[in-house]
Amino acid sequence: MMAKAVAGDVNPYIPKPVTIITVKNESLETKTLRLKLYNWRLSFVPGQFVQLLLPGVGEAPFCIASSQLDQKHIDLTIIRRGILTTSVHYLRPGDAVGIRGPLGKPFPLDAFVGKDLLIVATGIGIAALKSLIIYAIENRKKFNDVTLLYGARFLEDIVYRDELKEWEKSINVVITLSKAPPEWRGLRGRVTDHLGSLRLGKGTVAAVCGSPAVMSSIADALVKHGISSGDIYVSLERHMKCGIGKCARCIIPGGKHVCIDGPVFRVADISIGAIGE
Amino acid sequence: MRKALFCCLAGETMIKISKQELLQIPSLLSAMGYRVIAPIRAGGVVKLAPLGPDDQPEVEYIRIINSPKKFLLPDDESLFRYRSTATITSYGLKIRFPTAEGPCPVTILPEYLPIRERLAFFGIHQCMVSSVRYLDKVMMSDPADPYYKNRREGMFIAELDCDEGDEYCMCRTLGTYKIPAGYADIQMRKSSSGYLVNAASEAGKELLSRLKKQDAQGAYPKPVPKMVNDFELVARDEQEIDAKGAPKSLEACTLCAACTVTCPTCYCMDIEDKFSLVDPSNVSRMRTRMSCQRKCYSAIAGGTAFLHAKEERFKWRVKHKFPFSINAFKLVGCTGCGNCVAYCPAGVDFREFVGRRVA
């Protein structure tokens, strides 16, 4: 039998227009766009994403990188990697783009309450976790210890420099560079090298985002350090086209759709092969 | 409404007609306001196509090269059109909108007209009816795809029973020769003298009343189709598929994607903006077919792809049909029509991979 009609029969493929109000250079290849929504509000939960439409170029999914309290603006941090993201770098304040969303399942924030929160981000993966970091700071009393372990390759690759200084006041921020310059005084090496120096235990939940290959090695290392795979959450990346489970482009091993069952997954619910390449 | 439940057999009407009268059914359907799509023999193959006034529908066939998917989810479909102020410059496409001060200066005005025509499929076999059921599961799950839903609602299916498959068929193994309740408005089958027609919905009964025939006695027969090769499924779990070696014939595979093109349930798609270089501001958001056999299917920005070798892509296709669909939609995605085997130029037979030949 056929399913019932969707409430309101809204066409989920049609984006809503937004305009860019500021463009901030985060690093050589990374920019943060601040988008203004007109006459509508976007209420989202950290971990959800939007489909950004560049007129004439196409659509791509990006995690929202701003506070959920501000429903009239959203931030998207975008690194120049493909065709669409290169076009994004030519955008200027005043340009209009379209967004669809919020889409996907967010972080289960209620399950994090009262626990130690470890946020592991590598490279541009921090953009997908920024809304969670902001949430943790805004609701600092809900959590026990909050640690951000941020790994980048070069010193120039570090994004959110202003925010990181701000965040250090309320949460524990650890930055490590795998290809650090000689003058770098902080930690060196990969994020997995420094998990041992953190206090990890049964009451810790971890949120991880990075490149696919790195994420699976981080998940492995976290399990070795005593965090159960049921307490590790990863935010996966796939090039979803529709965002509503119809195009089948984002299916991961196990048959789950990243767009509707994710992008946030519990490592226990998916195979490690689903994370990596 | 044709969507009404009709679980009891007492609600069904059966008549006996000649072949001449059977071939009149498409014109009766057009008279009822449907756009009739029927199998037509052309260019050495039988394919589903909109039936013109002079076309003769083919009723004595085993295999069609396309499927209802071609009409329910067209290969190239405009989702909506909008205007941008994009211009082509010497260094590529330049998108520029007026500066935003005050209210949003740009509105994406999607020009989208819902299609109002009702489709009627005449003379499709059980495997193709099962493919509509699978596409329904995918496209009508929340949130429903509005374009698919539009075409699917008020659709008429006149199913023609297939009693004997060819060497590529596998519907007996998968049980897809049974018509799920509510999926065929009328069922037709060849009998010793002419054809038996069984109506199972209100629309089907209306059609039968237009044929002006006496009700026939007896029950509508439901035999199991004969298969040339019989298989039993041995690998339908993800682990089992992963553990198996790829079939030898896969060496000859050129990743031409004929398997996914002819498959009645392969619904993967790409959505992209298309515009003419003459008028770049007039953009169409197009939905086109995509195949898991292509590299760009799994590629993400930066060039990372998740499916590399053709063995992985072959297994991905099989996994999408079996474990992934069972997990996500509680339904096997393969209807056993055998199109991917019959039209594969390399002779890759997935049945040998997931199943075992039964003597």
Image: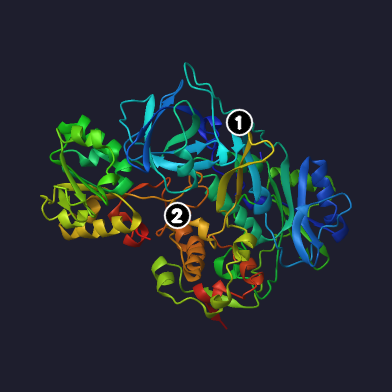
Residue, disc 1: B110
Residue type highlighted by circle 1: Pro
Q: Identify whether B347 is placed above or below B261.
A: below
Q: Mark 2 lies on which chain?
A: A
Q: What element carries label 1?
A: loop
Q: Which residue is drawn at 58% across and 73% down?
A: B253
Tag count? 2
Residue A123 vs residue B183, the one in the foreground: A123
Residue drawn at x 82%, y 57% is B57
Compared across the picture, whether A234 is left or right of B173 comes to left
Position in image of residue A122 (x %, y %): 27, 49
Q: Is residue B219 placed above or below A181 in the rendered structure?
A: below
Determine the secondary structure under disc 2. strand
Residue drawn at x 29%, y 57% is A214
Q: Residue furthest top?
A: B102
| Left or right: where A74 falls relative to B276 | left
Left or right of A19 on screen, residue B115:
right
**Vertical order, A202 against A104 (above or below):** below
Give the residue pinned by disc 2. A251
- Label 2 is placed on what type of residue? Ile
